[in-house]
Amino acid sequence: MKRHTFLPRLAAIAALLLAAASFTSCEDDESTLGIDLVDPATLYAPKYDTLYPDHAWSQIEDSLLTSTIYAYSIVGNLVDPIFGRTSAELFAQVALPEDVITLDFSGLQIDSVVMSLVKHQLHPDTAATYRMHFEVKQLAEAVESDRRYYSTDELPVQEDKVLYDGTVSVGYTDSVVRLHLDTEVAKQMLTQADSASAFIATAKGLRVRIADDSGNGMMSIDFSSTATCITIYYHYTIEDEVRTGSYDFLMGAGTAFFTHFKHDYSGTVLAAADSVDGSNRLYLEPLGGHCIHLNFDRDLRTFHEEHPLAVIHHAELRLPLASESSSLVPDKLIIMEKAGMDSLVPIDDMIDMYTLNGFDGTYHADLGYYRLRVTQHLQGLLRQGNDKGMIMLIDKRRHTTSHAIVNGTADKATSPKIVFVYTESNL
């Protein structure tokens, strides 16, 4: 299910595809549409065709990994008339620097304890200012460094160990949000350990959330930055001279964390079940929400029977947005396929998507649809002779709030489709 190459002029063929006004269905006879656009000096005459999905649906992504290997987390709440209510909570480990073995604050007077969260972005309006009611509590169980956490996972908290409960204003120009923690609770949590591993087990970690009374608004946090941390400020006296200092605990780079997402679809079209038929509309949602499943098996088999030696030069999946879709659409989409029962892998074309210029996975407002390159994938499906389905996901869906509504399959004129250029091999 991999790749095939052909003769020169691939770039010219790709340009021809973009210029073509429409394509024939694989159920129709081949057409001469677009022949006048072909350079008569070309070494071969390209043909154009289209595949339409025979089955499509939206389904909740219930196994979204959100722990440590990713650079960002997100906290907050959003309410949307189509996608319902979404909340995001952060569960974070607090650790000692790698070169610290023991911890001793005896003889020091702790003045304050500050949690610093490096802001990555505000959502949904990146330029707005939000009033956010942060709540920080100590966990009752430690965040484990070697465990894989998913979006549905969460850990219990110690309800009486409240380190912060207050409202701060966060705007576009703010790079770091600083929360002044309860000094006494923080001292109990952070100053008891005789080793780095014992410290993690004793401190356990923190849950950071934004309370419901904050209204709509989320903030993504940069966990790749060492400036995301907890700092103890202290002073001490030597020979009647007061000296001050500070000590940083890791909470960003080098620590474990994960994000928990909760969705409430009550009163929406998505409330009935975990999956929704795609005849009318298809839904793309981040933060462990809905992804799109497409299957082109019927048209693919028909085309394969009629053109068993077809060579695919260029193919793209087009996803037209519905009229009611928000203008704040995701920056990029990706395509995955199943690899066994419980895992997804990128299709071949997606592996190179971040090094390719142009349209791969991006939305084109002038055309009204997303375009995703599927050339290698389609060639592989033709070799295989069937389509087991592909899955559309929002890139960076662990820390973005942008969503999209895609036209369903009922009307071919506005349906998702694969348009492609091919020739017949003489082999």
Image (cartoon, rainbow, N blue to C red):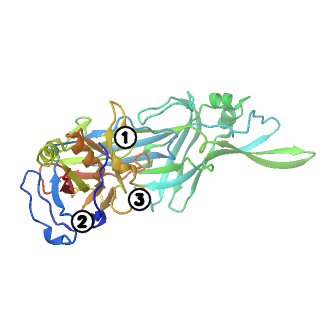
Disc 3 versus disc 1: distance between alpha carbons? 32 Å
Residue drawn at the location 33% of the way across and 61% of the way down: 359
Quarter of the image where one finds residue 295 = top left
Q: Residue 74 in the image: x percent, y percent?
A: 47, 46
- The residue singled out by tag 1 in the image is 345
Q: Nearer the viewer, mark 3 or mark 1?
A: 1
Give the mark nearer the N terminus: 3 vs 2: 2
Callout 3: SS: loop
Image quadrant occupied by the N terminus: top left
- The residue singled out by tag 2 in the image is 18
Crowd around label 1: few <14 · some 14–19 · many ≥20 (10 Å): some
Q: Amino acid at mark 2?
A: Leu
Q: Amino acid at mark 3?
A: Asp
- The residue singled out by tag 3 in the image is 125
Give the mark nearer the N terminus: 3 vs 1: 3
Residue drawn at the location 74% of the way across and 47% of the way down: 246
